[in-house]
Image (spheres, rainbow, N blue to C red):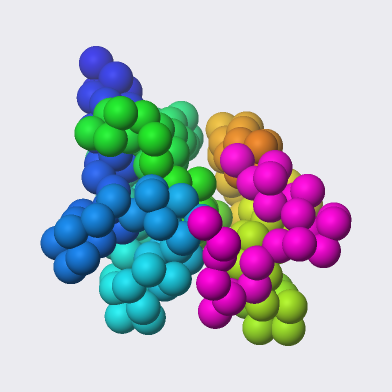
Amino acid sequence: MDLLLTIIVGYLLGSISFSYIFTKKIKKIDIRQHGSGNAGATNTLRVLGVGPAVAVLLLDALKGIVAVLLGYFFGGEGLAPALGGLAAIVGHNWPVFLRFRGGKGVATTIGVLATLVFWPALAAGIIAIVSIVVTRFVSLGSLLFLLGTMVLSIVFREYFDYPVEYVYLLIAVTALSFWRHRANIIRLIKGKESKIGQKVKQ
């Protein structure tokens, strides 16, 4: 019962779309109909600017953090926090409050992984940030973060004594993120991906 509650609450937390809320409040528009059409921090930057984008990034990450902490509270280390975090990511991507059309879940995933596997996530995060600064491709940095965190967590799992459930979660969220970014990957290969600060054609 506690595990089911963790999943449900995690999903509902993830379903709160702060980018949608902010654009509705500030500009009276649906962010999913502007910019890249994605309900996330990067598109918030395009549509509203730096301040709201940073706020959305932090709040979306907080959803993942809270979902994992609830898992620890209800079920201890292992399956419960992993499923709570996954539920939050799924909720962000397919939010029940927005007819299941949300974002790509990167910020929420950052919150989840930073709580579960902090040191691998930190190392991969540094690599991702450097990549974004150099290339200005947020999508590339996001994918490098997921892939790097997964690889480092698996390699150093015994050193950090991570439960095997975390490995399964990392494989699942990395695969999910690559699938959600499939259009970005194609554009990256073709050299047509939008860079941060660059307007997206409608």
In the picture, which quadrant includes the N terminus? top left
* In magenta segment, residue 181: yes
Q: Nearest the camera: 8 or 70?
A: 8
Asked if residue 157 can be seen in this view, the reply is no
- Residue sitting at x 31%, y 23%: 3
- Residue sitting at x 69%, y 52%: 184
- Whether 8 is drawn above or below 93: the answer is above
User: Which stretch did the figure color magenta?
Assistant: 180-202
Q: At which x and y percent is residue 119?
A: 59, 66
Q: Nearest the camera: 148 or 44?
A: 44
Quadrant of residue 129 within the rendered picture: bottom right
- Residue sitting at x 74%, y 78%: 135
Q: Is residue 79 left or right of residue 127?
A: left
Quadrant of residue 62 within the rendered picture: bottom left
Q: Is residue 180 left or right of residue 61?
A: right
Q: Is residue 98 left or right of residue 154?
A: left
Q: Nearest the camera: 182 or 54?
A: 182
Q: Nearest the camera: 2 or 38?
A: 38
Q: At which x and y percent is residue 147?
A: 72, 53
Q: At which x and y percent is residue 162?
A: 59, 46
Residue ranking furthest to the front = 202
- Residue sitting at x 60%, y 40%: 180
Residue ranking furthest to the left = 25
Quadrant of residue 31 within the rendered picture: bottom left
- Whether 159 is drawn above or below 182: the answer is below
Asked if residue 182 can be seen in this view, the reply is yes
* In magenta segment, residue 64: no
- Whether 48 is drawn above or below 169: the answer is below
- Whether 68 is drawn above or below 142: the answer is above
